[in-house]
């Protein structure tokens, strides 16, 4: 009787474990669920949290965007499909900032060059900076 009671308990425990396992969300459900940060951990690319979603978060400088960047910059996380999406958005933003800074610096240099006098003429047959009389 005791053996049959134990085997009954074992069967119930096994059934409970199987039922609990069935309740686990799939990778697709994690990727497209209600939590964008959980989606970053999914091995499946999210259709819900795509580049347009992360770009809106970045433009608005949300806390979610900051958390996503921090998570995806953590070593080992950047290869996850949804972190790659965050990385592409981040790269685009950083490239745009670099281009704006380069344009600003170019404008500054152009303004500064307007204040320079003309360069002295160079006579043919003579190197600039050579001593008069042809002696080097």
Image (cartoon, grey):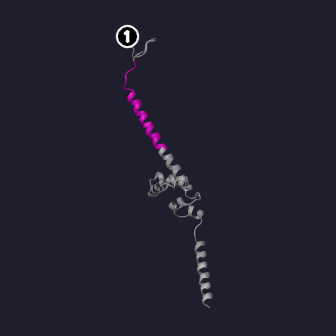
Q: Looking at the image, is 32 positioned above or below residue 52?
A: below
Quadrant for residue 114, please give it: top left
Quadrant for residue 97, please give it: top left
Measured as percent of width and height from the top left, residue 91 is found at 50, 47
Question: Does residue 117 appear to the left or right of 83 in the view shown?
Answer: left
Q: Residues within 10 Å of mark 1 (few under 14, many from 20)?
A: few
Residue 75 inside the magenta-drawn segment:
no
Considering every residue shown, the one lying at the far top of the view is 133
Tally the numbered discs.
1
Disc 1, SS: helix
Q: Main secondary structure of the magenta part?
A: helix
Measured as percent of width and height from the top left, residue 43 is found at 58, 59
Q: Which residues are magenta?
A: 95-119
Q: Looking at the image, is 116 positioned above or below residue 12?
A: above
Considering every residue shown, the one lying at the far bottom of the view is 1
Measured as percent of width and height from the top left, residue 129 is found at 39, 16
Residue at 47 percent of width and 51 percent of height: 59
Question: Does residue 64 appear to the left or right of 79 in the view shown?
Answer: left
Quadrant where the N terminus sits is: bottom right
Quadrant for residue 136, please give it: top left
For mark 1, what is the residue?
132
Residue at 55 percent of width and 56 percent of height: 80
Residue 115 inside the magenta-drawn segment:
yes
Residue at 60 percent of width and 85 percent of height: 6
Measured as percent of width and height from the top left, residue 67 is found at 45, 57
């Amino acid at each position: 009787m005791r053996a049959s009671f134990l085997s009954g308990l074992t069967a119930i425990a096994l059934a409970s474990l199987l039922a609990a396992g069935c309740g686990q969300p799939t990778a697709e459900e994690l990727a497209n669920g209600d939590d964008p940060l959980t989606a970053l951990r999914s091995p499946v690319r999210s259709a819900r949290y795509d580049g347009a979603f992360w770009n809106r978060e970045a433009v608005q400088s949300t806390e979610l965007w900051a958390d996503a960047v921090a998570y995806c910059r953590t070593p080992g996380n950047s290869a996850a499909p949804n972190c790659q999406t965050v990385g592409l958005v981040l790269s685009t933003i950083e490239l745009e900032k670099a281009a704006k800074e380069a344009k600003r610096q170019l404008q500054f240099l152009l303004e500064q060059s307007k204040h320079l006098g003309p360069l002295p003429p160079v006579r043919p047959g003579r190197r600039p900076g050579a001593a008069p009389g042809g002696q080097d």
